[in-house]
């Protein structure tokens, strides 16, 4: 039995009740690339409410899914015999699909969920490589979709979104590049440097958004008085960053920033040591989120800095089980014997929002009714308030962001918030220190 089938077996909970339409399109269950295929709806009833969940359980983005089993166990425990909508109890099945950190595969499994599993709503997490192809398939097939764990610009503009129009079926909650910039500047301004920054951005949706000369980091950094040395877009999974490192050394860069996947940063940082490049600050998005990555770097991980989406000092509680952020991180550590990770909060909140939508929809057999429940969401979650209609574009609502630094202590590394200027309600735990 495959891992997906095992996960599917664990997801069936409760009693039998009617739900929704079925889809007639047997030939489109599998595709070889993320081309958009349209399913043909037909009115029917199913026995359960089905939630599709696409996540990178394998591949270079697997760190985002490290806590999935823990989160799904908590969510399924809360669901119990099902959820209640308009006085009727419905069983819920969560169907998990591995994107393998590959956009083509993400599109494939999204179509499997839509055409084969006939989900009522589809969800996805972890960077535009997963969120975007899933959302594109949902939009084309008119299936309600909620995503998170991806800055809103790569999600929206990476799908060719038009701010004047937006999308019809796909909704997203997370922070944006403007929040990253504010958090990073909040850290860097507290330390004396020459304000020369080496920018390292991959040729992917995230990297192109972060390095965009109009909407990304370059214009904001220039406005703040920093000089960015942008060496262009590198190919993901590169094994040689000599050209970038040489350019940073020649320009005298004392700060390095950008967005990288963990394997790329490990290669880059090792080569920085080999080539004698020693910046004061290294602040990298995505790669430095995970304790496993920092631990693998040993002493070279001490002092690296990153955006901080979520952690045990954030002042929020779950709408599903009432846990505070501290209680949730403690529960994860106790259950897994591993350090907590930032995606825990957002993946948990994705199910908070999705279940809240299904409880409020007026007609669970009508996808448009589920969609209407998404757009009217107003929920306090473990990552803070989620409410569409107040965001930068129609399909996006934003969450809060701070930044901080990995600090090595007697019991390993701790992620310490060093600036909360973008979100003063989240407490600071220390002050940024230069790299040794």
Image (cartoon, rainbow, N blue to C red):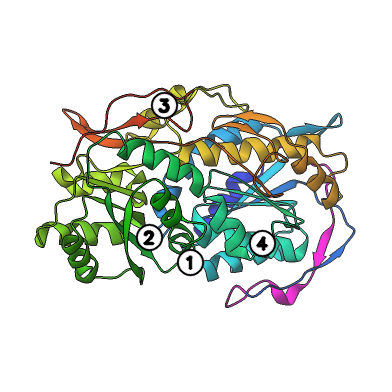
Q: SS at mark 4?
A: loop
Which residue has dot 2 on it? 60
Q: Characterize the local packing of mark 3: few (<14), some (14-19) or many (20 or more) Cα atoms within 10 angstroms.
A: some
Which residue has dot 1 on it? 102
Disc 3, disc 4: CB below 8 Å?
A: no
User: Does the magenta run of residues contain 435?
Assistant: no
| Earlier sequence position, callout 3 versus callout 1 | 1
The span from disc 2 to disc 4 (Cα, nearest Å) is 27 Å
Q: What percent of the width, then of the height, locates residue 246?
A: 17, 67
| Earlier sequence position, callout 1 versus callout 4 | 1
Q: Characterize the local packing of mark 4: few (<14), some (14-19) or many (20 or more) Cα atoms within 10 angstroms.
A: some
Nearer to us of marks 2 and 4 is: 4
Nearer to us of marks 3 and 4 is: 4
User: Does the magenta run of residues contain 29?
Assistant: yes
Q: Characterize the local packing of mark 2: few (<14), some (14-19) or many (20 or more) Cα atoms within 10 angstroms.
A: some
Q: Which residue is drawn at 74% across and 33% down?
A: 83
What's drawn in magenta, residue-wise?
Answer: 14-34
| Earlier sequence position, callout 2 versus callout 3 | 2
Which residue has dot 3 on it? 312
Q: SS at mark 1?
A: loop
Q: Is residue 263 left or right of residue 223?
A: left
């Amino acid at each position: 039995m495959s891992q997906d089938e095992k996960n599917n077996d664990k997801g069936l909970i409760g009693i039998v009740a009617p739900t929704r339409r079925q889809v007639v399109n047997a030939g489109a269950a599998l595709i070889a690339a993320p081309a958009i295929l349209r399913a043909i709806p037909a009115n029917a009833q199913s026995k359960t409410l089905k939630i599709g969940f696409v996540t990178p359980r394998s591949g270079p983005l697997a760190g985002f899914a490290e806590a999935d089993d823990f989160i799904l166990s908590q969510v399924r425990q809360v669901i119990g015999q099902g959820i209640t909508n308009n006085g009727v109890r419905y069983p819920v099945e969560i169907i998990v699909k591995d994107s393998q950190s590959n956009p083509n595969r993400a599109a494939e499994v999204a179509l499997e969920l839509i055409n084969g599993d006939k989900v009522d709503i589809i969800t996805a997490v972890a960077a535009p490589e997963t969120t975007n192809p899933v959302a594109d398939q949902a939009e084309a097939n008119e299936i309600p979709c909620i995503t998170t764990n991806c800055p809103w610009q790569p999600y929206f503009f990476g799908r060719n979104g038009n701010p004047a129009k937006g999308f019809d079926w796909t909704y997203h909650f997370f922070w944006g590049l403007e929040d990253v910039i504010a958090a990073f500047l909040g850290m860097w301004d507290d330390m004396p440097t020459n304000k020369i920054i080496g920018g390292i951005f991959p040729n992917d949706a995230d990297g192109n958004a972060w390095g965009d000369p109009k909407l990304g980091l370059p214009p904001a950094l220039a406005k703040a008085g920093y000089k960015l040395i942008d060496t262009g877009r590198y190919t993901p999974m590169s094994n040689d960053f000599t050209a970038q490192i040489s350019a940073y050394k020649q320009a005298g860069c004392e700060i390095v920033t950008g967005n990288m996947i963990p394997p790329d940063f490990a290669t880059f940082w090792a080569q920085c040591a080999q080539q004698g490049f020693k910046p004061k600050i290294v602040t990298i998005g995505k790669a430095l989120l995970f304790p496993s990555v920092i631990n693998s770097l040993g002493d070279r991980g001490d002092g690296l800095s990153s955006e901080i989406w979520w952690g045990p000092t954030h002042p929020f509680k779950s709408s599903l089980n009432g846990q505070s952020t501290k209680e949730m991180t403690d529960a994860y550590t106790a259950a897994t014997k591993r350090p907590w990770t930032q995606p825990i909060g957002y993946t948990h909140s994705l199910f908070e929002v999705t279940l809240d939508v299904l409880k409020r929809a007026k007609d669970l057999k009508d996808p448009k009714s589920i969609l209407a429940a998404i757009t009217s969401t107003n929920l306090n979650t473990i990552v803070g308030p989620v409410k569409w209609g107040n965001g930068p574009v129609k399909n996006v609502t934003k969450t809060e962001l701070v930044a901080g630094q990995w600090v090595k202590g007697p019991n390993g590394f701790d992620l310490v918030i060093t600036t909360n200027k973008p979100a003063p309600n989240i407490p600071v735990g220390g002050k940024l220190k230069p790299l040794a």
